Amino acid sequence: MAVVEVDALGGVCLNRGCIPSKALIASAVQYQKMKNATAYGINLAAPPVYDWNAMMVRKNKIVNGLVGGISHLFKSHGVDHYSGYGRLTSKTEVTVFGEDGSETKLQADNIILATGSRSLAIPTFPFDGSRILNSDHLLEATNLPESLLIIGAGVIGCEWAFMVSMLDVKVTMVEMLDHALPMEDTDTSKLIERELKKLKVKLHTSVKVEAVTSGPQGVTAKLSGDKTVEANQVLVSVGRAYNTEDLGLEVVGVKLNKDGSIPTTKEMRTNIRNIFAIGDVRGEILLAYTATHDGTVAVDNALGAKEKIDYNGVPSVIFTHPEVGSVGLTEKAASEKHDIAIGKFPLRALGKAHAENEIAGEVKVIGDKKSDQLLGVHVVGLHAAEIIHTAALAVRSKMKVSQLGSMVFGHPVISEAIMEAAHDLHGMSVHLAKKK
C-alpha cells in the first residue's frame, strides 16, 4: 500500500483545520477564564496578558507532533509514503512528481482519491494574505489585528469570531442568511447569536458584502443597504473549492459534478470502478470524521467487501464558546414530515454547569408525538461537542425518546441535560418548574 502526498501528512484537518484551530481556541478559552478568575474565587496578582506568538508555537508543536505520529504509523503498518504531486496517468497508474523533478510511476489495482478541499476564492474578495484573508492565513498570522470583519457566519466564521473576540479583537460579522450558523436548528442559532453579543461581536444578518476596498483602518466593506464597515482585516469564510484540478481525471475518464466535486456511489466508487473518492472531494459532507468513514468503506471494498456509507446518526460539532453539538433533524425539518413534540432543558438548571461557571446554553430534544421516535437532539453549552455522541448513538440506534430518558446518567455531569430534556418532552422533568 502506498500514499502520495504533496504536503505535510494529515491533510487540511491536521495542518490547516481541526487541530490547529482547536489548539488556538483552547488558548483563547483559557485566557477568557483567567480574565474571569474572580468568579472561581481566584484573585490574580495582575491582569492576564496573552502572547499570540507563544500560542502559535504551542499550536505548531501540537500539529508537528501529530504529523510525526502519522509517519510512525505508516512505518508500523508497512505503508509507503511518496512525497510529491500525484497524477493519474492510467486507470491503474499514478505518476508522482517530486519537488526535485523526479518522476515515480506506481501501479495499483485500486486507487483512492482523497485530495480534499480548500478555501473558496471569490473574485469580489481576492485573497492577498495581508488585508483579505482566509482561515489558512489567520492560522499563520504573526499577530492579531485590532479589528476583524468576518464574511460568513457559518461554522468556520463563528469559531474564529469567538476565538479572536475572546482575545480582545473587535469583530464584525456579515451573513447573507437570517441567522448565524444557518444550517443548525434555529434555537441553536439564536443562542449562539446571544453569546456573540455578550462578547460585543457585531452581527449583520440578511446582508451581503458588495465590495471591499482600502480604508482608513485597512479595509472598508460596502454592505447591501448602503451600510459600511471599517476593519483592519477581512476573513472570508464562505465556502470550499474541491481539489480536482490537474489530477489526470480527464485522462482516465473520471466524471465530475458541475461544482468540481467527484460523484460516487455509496460504495465510494467513481464511474471508474477501481477508482474511489473519499472525503471533502466528494462534495457531500465536508468533515474529517465522515472522510475517515468514507475511507474505511473504500478500503474494504477495494479489498473485495461490499460495504456502503452510513451517515445515520452522524453528529455535527462546532467549537464556539459555548460549543454546539447536534444530530438528526432540526425542528423545521422534522415538522415538515412529523407531528413533533419538543423537550428542552437549560444548562443553568444543572449543578455541574454552575460549578464550572458555564451556565449558557440548553439541550433540545425533538421526537415524533405519536411514535415517540427520537428525531433530533441539539446541544449548546459546555462540552456539547463531547456529550452529543450519547444522542448520536440514540439516533443511530433508532431509540424512542422515552428510552433515552430512561438511561441513568452520572451526577453531576453536563450530559444529564440530555436526560432532562427527554423527560421534559413528556412533561416529566422534575428539575423544571411544572408547566401550567
Image (spheres, rainbow, N blue to C red):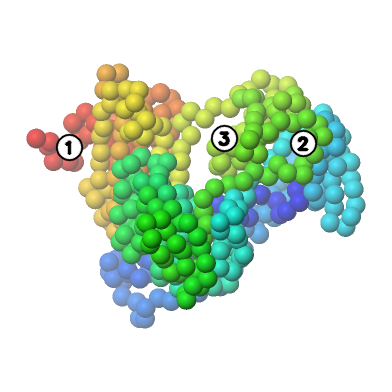
What secondary structure is found at the residue carrying circle 3? loop
Rendering quarter of residue 255: top right
Residue 60: x and y in percent read 61, 63
Identify the residue at horizontal 34%, vertical 33% (top origin). Answer: 332
Judged from this view, the residue extending furthest toward the left is 436
Mark 2, Cα crowd under 10 Å, few <14 / some 14-19 / many 20+, is some
Residue 353: x and y in percent read 29, 52
Left or right of 223 in this view: 137: right
Query: Where is mark 2, residue-wise?
Result: 249
Foreground: disc 1 or disc 3? 3
Q: CA distance from mark 1 to mark 3?
A: 42 Å
Foreground: disc 2 or disc 3? 2
Identify the residue at horizontal 63%, vertical 55% (top origin). Answer: 15
User: Which amino acid, mark 2?
Assistant: Leu
Tag 3 or tag 2, which sits nearer the N-term?
2
Residue 89: x and y in percent read 85, 37
Judged from this view, the residue extending furthest toward the bottom is 46
Q: CA distance from mark 1 to mark 2?
A: 60 Å
Residue 430 — which label? Answer: 1
What secondary structure is found at the residue carrying circle 1? loop
User: Which amino acid, mark 3?
Assistant: Glu
User: Which amino acid, mark 1?
Assistant: Val
Query: Where is mark 3, residue-wise?
Result: 284
